[in-house]
Amino acid sequence: MIHIKTFVFNAFSVNTYLIYNEQKECIIIDAACNSADEISKLEKCIESNDLTLIALANTHGHMDHLAGIKYFKEKYNIPFYLAKEDEFLVGSAVSHAALFGLKIEQPPYPDKYLREGECFCLGEDRIEMLLVPGHSPGSIVFHFPEQSMLITGDVLFAGSIGRTDLPGGNYNTLIEGIKSKLLVLNGEAVFYPGHGPSSTIGEEKMHNPFLQ
């Protein structure tokens, strides 16, 4: 069984997700912590629950979602996963963050690429990769089919969608990807976005103004 804990980090209020199973293995999705206090909150949760951190994975490569990658990768000596299509964003993360008044350390490049259709296993629990570009070229949605749960990053929000005016963004591509890969899933599936509250696929299919 999968458990999820949510943290909201940095000036962009990014949702960072700590995912763990009954065997106490865990991964961090979008380690966005950008201060000693934010890092401490995440580490204390890992330690207090006696968890073993085995990997870092990102929904996409925008700088606000990368802020804590360097710290956790180096301290825990674990791999970092990102879609190849977003690898170019890692190199510009520091300068891009500076444009928005955010100071981050240079994130590491990924150790392994996330690919459409592949699965990441956390113990016996399967996590499917859905490539849904448009917000960024390599935006990945993590699908937990047994739990009917998704982590959508900045692809889909409660009542909205990701912005498409950043490098590699495309509005039509994003809408098509959401409709063909996400809205076809179980309407009761709960999704956890990169910013803001969770929602369900059914709720967005019925009421999200961008998807009507």
Image (cartoon, helix red, strand yellow):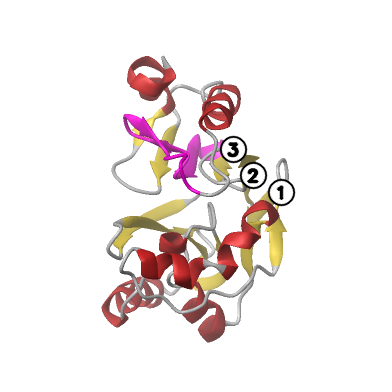
Look at the image and say whether residue 95 sits in the magenta stretch.
no
Assess whether mark 3 and mark 1 are in contact (beta carbons under 8 angstroms). Answer: no
Quadrant in which the C terminus appears = top left
* Dot 3 alpha-carbon crowd within 10 angstroms: few under 14, some 14 to 19, many 20 or more: many
State yes or no: discs 1 and 2 in contact (Cβ < 8 Å). Answer: yes
Q: Is residue 11 left or right of residue 125?
A: left
The residue pinned by badge 2 equals 129
Instruction: Tell me the number on the disc at residue 202.
Output: none
N-terminal of the two: label 1 or label 2?
1
Residue beneath disc 1: 115
Whether residue 123 appears in this view of the structure is no
Residue 148, position in %: x, y? Answer: 50, 34
Residue lying at 43% horizontally and 26% vertically, measured from the top left:
201
Say above or below: 71 vs 118. Answer: below
Segment tinted magenta in the rendering: 145-166
User: Which residue type does callout 2 highlight?
Assistant: Met
Q: CA distance from mark 3 to mark 2?
A: 9 Å
Residue at image location 33% in from the left, 39% down from the top: 198
Q: CA distance from mark 1 to mark 2?
A: 6 Å
Q: Nearer the viewer, residue 164 or 39?
A: 164
**Relative image position of residue 121 (x, y in whole percent):** 65, 54
First reached walking from the N terminus: tag 1 or tag 3: 1
Q: Residue 188 sits in which quadrant?
A: top left
Which of label 3 and label 2 is nearer to you? 3
In this rendering, the label closer to the viewer, 1 or 3: 3
**Is residue 29 or residue 175 the one in the foreground?**
175
In the image, is residue 117 above or below residue 212?
A: below
Q: What's the residue type where badge 1 is placed? A: Arg
Residue type of the residue flagged with mark 3: Val
Furthest toward the bottom, the residue is 75
Query: What label sits on residue 132 in the rendered view?
Result: 3
